[in-house]
Image (cartoon, helix red, strand yellow):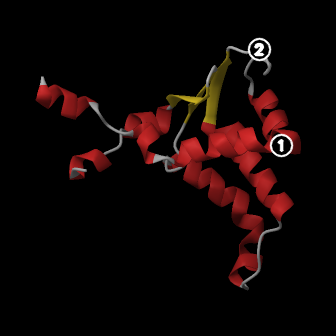
Amino acid sequence: MKLSDLKVDPDKERNGARVEIIPGLIVTLRSLSAPEVRAARDRLLMPYRKIVAMGGMIPPDAQDKITATLLAEHVVLGWEDKSGELPPYSKGKAAEIFGDPAWRRLRDLVYEAAGEAETFRQVVADNAVKN
C-alpha cells in the first residue's frame, strides 16, 4: 500500500458515491466523515451527552433510531433496486425502512459502506499519472 492509497475524494464524500450494497441494490450515499453528516450526528447525539459524560451508554433502541435518522436524512441520497423489493427512493421511505427492525441488516450494511474510506477513495490523480 502506498501513502497515496489513503487519499479520498472530498467531492464524493460530500456529494455522494454510488455503492452496490448487494447485487442489484445501488445506493448513493455521503460519507460519515462529510462535515454535514458529522454535524447532524452531533445534533442527534446532543440529548445523550450527559449520559455519556457520566459513563453511561446510549440505549440500543435510541442508537438504532439515531442511525436510521442519520442515514435517511443526511447520508442516503438515493437508491436503485433492480429487484423491485424496495419502493422508489424518498427520504420518507428511507426513514421508514431504516427505522424498521426487520430491515436492520440493510441499515447496517448501508452504514458500514458510508463509513468505509474505500467507498470514497480518490483514484483520478493516480490514473492520470499512470497514463
Residue sitting nearer the eye, 105 or 88: 105
Q: Position of residue 70 (x, y in %)?
A: 69, 46
Assess whether mark 2 and mark 1 are in contact (beta carbons under 8 angstroms): no
Residue 16 horizontal side relative to residue 72, left or right: left
Residue at the image position 87 percent from the left and 45 percent from the top: 101
Disc 1, SS: helix
Q: From this viewpoint, which residue is outermost toward the front?
A: 23
Q: From this viewpoint, which residue is outermost toward the bottom?
A: 54
Picture quadrant of residue 114: top right
Residue 70 horizontal side relative to residue 65, left or right: left
- Count every numbered label the image shows and give the total: 2
Residue at the image position 42 percent from the left and 38 percent from the top: 120
The residue that disc 2 covers is 84
Q: Position of residue 21 (x, y in %)?
A: 61, 32
Q: Which of the image's four quarters has the C terminus?
A: top left
Dot 1 amino acid type: Gly
Q: Position of residue 39 (x, y in %)?
A: 58, 54
Give residue 99's mark.
Answer: 1
Residue sitting nearer the eye, 40 or 2: 2
Picture quadrant of residue 48: bottom right
Residue at the image position 71 percent from the left and 73 percent from the top: 49
Q: CA–CA distance between discs 1 and 2?
A: 20 Å
Q: Position of residue 41 (x, y in %)?
A: 64, 55
Residue 90 horizontal side relative to residue 26, left or right: right
Q: Residues within 10 Å of mark 2 (few under 14, many from 20)?
A: few
Dot 2 amino acid type: Gly
Vertical relation: 81 (above or below) 57:
above
Disc 2, SS: loop
